[in-house]
Image (cartoon, helix red, strand yellow):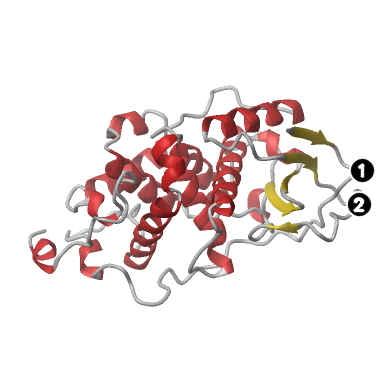
Amino acid sequence: MFRKQRAGTRAYDHHTSAQAHPRNRIHGSPCYDPSVFQFRSTSAPEFLPDLAAREWIATRLRTLAAQLHDVEATQAPQLIMPSSRMPVDLDGLFDLLCAMQEELGQADLEFTLLEASEQAPQLPKDFSTLGDPSGQLLHTAFGRGEYVLLYTPTLFKKKELLAASVARELGRMAIHQHDGHQGIETKDMEADSELAAIILGLGVWVANGSYLFENSCCGGGCGVDLRGLRTGLSMPEACFATALDGQRKGVGRRAVTKHLSPTQKSAFKTSWKHLGRLDAKALAPPISNPTTVSAPTQAEIEAL
């Protein structure tokens, strides 16, 4: 059952937006030998994330692929492309969320779509936000067995921002339905939600929006001040994760690049080329058999 509500019934305590803070990508013992991610070249491309970020992304993709096994194996398409005509109002956003939840096997989840404003009342005490809502145009709260998606009208001013936000929240709800974030700190939950979205086939959505957040500019004309907004993954990280996920699924490079914006396309190609030197399926195995693929052996690493 789906319901729409505008401000005045339930509200969101809007936090002051904050820029993304740097993350330590390594938590505890790394799952793989770091040398497997080294790029052996005399001039490292600027679009390739650093070693710690690459290791963290591959480790989390592997963990989330196993965690979301039933969703990806039976329901989620390998790749979902955003429409050229994204929603421009509340009704359109509601329809998009319903359609995407149907596509991803989340149709049985109840949610309320609510505009967040300073004038609206607070959320009930038994609802709590999932992850960190600061600097987000769309965020999810949960309570009493249902979700509330809180949005700000600015969300509709740039379709890439809307697509990336929708993808992240769909990933967030998928994680929440599968025992929540495991083994990470609160500050990494936004990035984790975006990785879940990529696993669900929404990598293009995440990657195309990440550049706008990172660059704090939409190219002019949209009237959005992006300096207070933030994303979980940087643009190179989002493109690296999309490339890694595409290779483990067997998705062709061109199937992805033709839907990416120019800068993201360059970053994606850089990561794709780098991953071509490795065994991407071993680093983040296909979901159809998530527990039987081992990390690369030392002999395999030395052979790279």
Q: Is residue 67 left or right of residue 36?
A: right
- Name the spot of residue 97 as percent of width and height, x first: 64, 33
Res. 245 image quadrant: top left
Label 1 sits on residue: 8
Figure check: 304 above or below 169: below
Q: Which residue is mark 2?
A: 121
Who's the residue at 84% across and 54% down the image? 123
Q: Residue 99's quadrant in the figure?
A: top right
Furthest toward the top, the residue is 85
Q: Residue at x 56, y 57 (%)?
A: 190
Residue shown at 46%/34% (left/top)? 75
The picture places residue 210, in percent across and down from the top left corner, at 51, 47
Give the left or right position of residue 282, taking residue 244 as reference: left
**Vertical placement of residue 41 versus 215, above or below:** below
Question: In terms of secondary structure, where does tag 1 sit?
Answer: loop
Q: Quick check: marks 2 and 1 in contact, CB under 8 Å?
A: yes
Asked whether 74 or 83 is in front, the reply is: 74
Label 2's element? loop
Residues packed near mark 1 inside 10 Å, few (<14), some (14 to 19) or many (20 plus): some
Q: Is residue 130 visible?
A: yes
Task: Tell me the kind of residue under disc 2.
Answer: Pro
Q: Is residue 162 above or below residue 58?
A: above
Q: Earlier in the sequence, mark 2 or mark 1?
A: 1
Q: Residues within 10 Å of mark 2 (few under 14, many from 20)?
A: some
Nearest the viewer among 139 and 38 is: 139
**Dot 1 amino acid type:** Gly
- Residue farthest to the bottom, as pictured: 28
Q: Is residue 269 visible?
A: no
Q: Which quadrant, please, contains the N terminus?
A: top right
